Image (cartoon, rainbow, N blue to C red):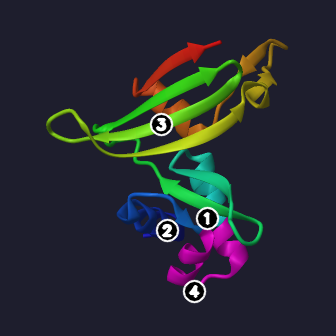
Amino acid sequence: MNRDEEVWGWLLEHQGFVRYSDIKKAFCRLHDAQLSNSLRRLEEQGLAIRQVILLEKGGPASVYLAVDPSDPTLRIRLVDMGGWEFATLQWLGEDGLPRRSASITLGDVTEFIETDAKGELVIKRPAWLELLAEKGRVNSESYS
């Protein structure tokens, strides 16, 4: 098992957002750069979500959530509130009802607008969201 798989497996076991400092404690044998690079690669592969939160005391902190694209119980509800996007991740139980969920702010839609090879504007969302959308796990809603 490589380092990225080990970190991802550890995050999956926690079933919720985990602060970087807690991940660092679990992987104390890794240098900060090694752990940060692993987490960055997991984000790029669509296997982890990073969100920056503001702590009551102190500054911002990074939190991470593992995503398993092969998990058939995972569903995403993407909501556009007049150009500001939010995502709710839900893991459904056998009864079809959510057994756990996590909500995140994706930010302003304009942050995702890029120019493709043909010079056309496209919306490119985070890797984890694109991957799950390809698998038909994302429902979009729009409110003005």
Residue 137's quadrant in the figure? Answer: top left
Q: CA distance from mark 3 to mark 2?
A: 23 Å
Q: CA distance from mark 1 to mark 3?
A: 25 Å
Disc number placed over residue 97 in the picture, else none: none
Give the residue number, with chain letter if any, for mark 4.
28
Give yes or no for contact between labels 1 and 2 (Cβ–Cβ under 8 Å): yes
Badge 4 density bin: few <14, some 14–19, many ≥20, Cα 10 Å: few
Q: CA distance from mark 2 to mark 4?
A: 12 Å
Give the residue number, with chain letter if any, for mark 3.
88
Q: Is residue 48 above or below residue 75?
A: below
Image quadrant holding the N terminus, namely bottom left
Disc number placed over residue 7 in the picture, else none: 2
- Considering every residue shown, the one lying at the far right of the view is 119
Give yes or no for contact between labels 4 and 1 (Cβ–Cβ under 8 Å): no
Tell me which label, 1 or 3, sits earlier in the chain. Answer: 1
Q: CA distance from mark 1 to mark 2?
A: 7 Å
